[in-house]
Image (cartoon, rainbow, N blue to C red):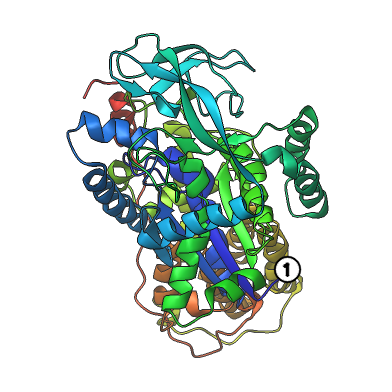
Amino acid sequence: MNSKAIITSALPYANGEIHIGHVASTYLPADVTTRFLKQKGVEAYYICASDDFGTPILVQSEKEGKTPEEYVQYWNKRDFEDFEAFNIKFDFFYKTSSSENRQFVQDVFKKLERAGHIYENEIIQLYCNTDKKFLPDRYVVGTCPYCKADDQYSDLCEKCGRVPEEIENPHCSICGQTPVKKKTMHYFFKLKNFSDKISQYLEDNKNLQKDVKKYVQNWIKEGLTDWDITRDISWGIPIPTDGPSEKVFYGWFDNHLAYISSTIKFLNDNDIDGKKFWNESDIYHFIGKDIVYHHYLFLPAMRLGIGEEYKLPDYIPTRGHLTLQSKKISKSRNWYIGLKDFLAIFPADYLRFYLISINPYSQDDLNFNWDEFATKINSELIGNLGNLVNRVLGFTVKSFNSIVPGPDEFDDMDKESEKMINELVSHLDTLMTENHLDRSLKKILQFSAHFNQYFQHKEPWKNGPGTNSCIFLSVNAIRSLAIAIYPFLPESSQKIWSQLGLEGNVSAQMFDEISSITLKEGHKLGSVSPLFEKVEESVIEEQKSKLGASS
C-alpha cells in the first residue's frame, strides 16, 4: 500500500438534490475507503467538486429563470451540506466553474493541440427552429443506435452505457419538435489514436475490475471514434481560440480534469507540492457503471495525450445502480428518496450500514427495499452489534461498578475468543484493501455475533468461574469493534468509544489497533446507554406511502 492516496468520486451535477441512489455507488464507498486509508496511516485526501457545466444545467437554469452561475452556486452549497449531514467527509469540495479549473482545462487543451491530438471539423448539428438554438446533448432525446432503448439522451445511453455516435429518431427535449440539421465547426480529440496505449494501460493495471476491463477492451476492439469536445452553447469553459464566442468545452472534457485541478489547489494551498503529490500517490476514482466509457477511455486518453504529466488512475472502483422498491429511481415520478429527507427521519449510520451491506464490489445493481432496511437495522445493527455493546457494557457497569476486571486463567472458549480479537485485523485488512466493503462489514458482524454467543454461554450473571475473563475479553472486543466500524459508522463508533471511557476521537486510532487487547484491569467505563433505536413498522409504512405520490 502506497503511503499517499488521492480519492475522488464522480462529480455530482449541480442541478438537483442528492438522493440515496447517488451516494450508494460512489460517495459512500469512497468515504469508507478514505477513512480506512487514513486509519492505515496513509496520507489520503478525498477530493470532490460540483459539476457546474453542461447542457442539463443550462436547460434547468433557463426553466427557473436564473443565471447558470446563480443556479450552480445554490446547488454546490446545498449538495455539500447534504453530504456533510451524511458524514461524507471530503477534505476539499470545490467546483468545475472555478477559475483554477477553467485555466487548467484551457491549458490541457492547448497542450493536446500542440501535440497534434486536436483538429477542427465541420459537422452537421441538430438545430431547433422553434427554440432558435443548436441542440447538443441533453437538448436531444431519441433512440440509442446500439441497444435501441427509447428516450435516451444523445450524449449517453443509460441503458447500455455507451455514447451514441448519432442518436436515432431525435427530438428537441424543450419543445418536442423534430430538429433540422445545420453545419457548424467543432473541435475533435483524436481518441482512436490512443487505442493501443489505453489497451496497454488496461492490461498492465491489475487493480481494475476484470469484468469492466473486459468490455472496455471489447469497445476498443470494435473501434473507437474521435470525440467531439465542443458545444454550441453559452455556458461552459470557453475554447481558448479566436473562434466563435458561443462555443465551449463539452462537460465531459472538463469535469474529470477538475479531479486534478481541485486536488492541486487544495494541496498547494496547504503547502504541499500538488503535482508531485499526485504523481507519487495511489489514485482512486470511484464511479457508477453508467460512466465507465468516460473514465476508462476519455480520461486516460487525455492524460496520455499530455505525456502522462499527471498519472493515470490506479483504481477505478465501479459499482451498479440503486433501484428503489425494485423500480428505477425517478425524480419526475417522485420515485426517489432525497438524502436530506431520509436524514430527517433516521440517523446517517442507519443508511450507511444498510447501503454498504447490500452493495458488492461489482456492477450488479442493488435494490433499496424499505422492509429489508428495517429488518437489517433491527436484527443486524441493533440485535447483533447494538445488543452486544449495551449488554456487555451495561453488565460491567451494574455488576463491576464500571471497572474492567483482571482475567482469570483462560479456558478453551476464552482462548478462541482471544484468537478472534487477534485475527480480526488481518481479515478486515485484506477485504478493505480489495474494496470488498460489504464483506468487511459482514466479517465485523460475525465477530460481534461470536461475542454475543460467548457472553451468553459464559453466563457471567451467575458469577461463576471465568466470569472475569468473559468481561475482560468482551469489553476489549467492543473496543476492537469501535475501531473496526469507524470507516462505516463514524457516529456510532465514537459513541462506543466514549461509552468505553476512552478519551479523544476514535478516528485517531490506527487500524492495526483493532487486534490489540489494551483495556487492562482497573479501566473505568464511561456512561453507558443504548446506541440505537428500533425502526418502527408504522414509520416504514409511512415512507412507502410517499413513493410515487404527487407532491
Question: In this view of the protein, can residue 244 be seen by the observer?
Answer: yes
Q: Residue at x 55, y 25 (%)?
A: 157
Looking at the picture, how far across and down is residue 396, in whole percent?
A: 46, 75
* Residue closer to the observer: 450 or 481: 481
Residue 224 horizontal side relative to residue 45, left or right:
right
Count of numbered marks: 1
* Residue closer to the observer: 506 or 279: 279
Q: Amino acid at mark 1?
A: Ser
Q: Quadrant of residue 321?
A: top right
Looking at the picture, how far across and down is residue 155, in whole percent?
A: 51, 28
Q: Quadrant of residue 234?
A: top left
Q: Is residue 6 above or below residue 542?
A: below
Looking at the picture, how far across and down is residue 451, in whole percent?
A: 61, 63
* Residue closer to the observer: 26 or 368: 26
Q: Is residue 331 above or below residue 457?
A: above
Q: Residue at x 66, y 57 (%)?
A: 313
Q: Is residue 506 above or below residue 320?
A: below
The quarter of the rendered structure image containing the C terminus is: top left
Question: In this view of the protein, can residue 355 be seen by the observer?
Answer: no
- Element carrying mark 1: helix
Q: Residue furthest front?
A: 242
The quarter of the rendered structure image containing the N terminus is: bottom right
Looking at the picture, how far across and down is residue 381, in whole percent?
A: 48, 52
Q: Are there few (<14), some (14-19), or many (20+) residues within 10 Å of tag 1?
A: some
Q: Which residue is mark 1?
A: 426
Residue 482 horizontal side relative to residue 190, left or right:
left
* Residue closer to the observer: 144 or 84: 144
Q: Residue at x 23, y 20 (%)?
A: 550
Residue 256 horizontal side relative to residue 430, left or right:
left
Q: Residue furthest bottom?
A: 522
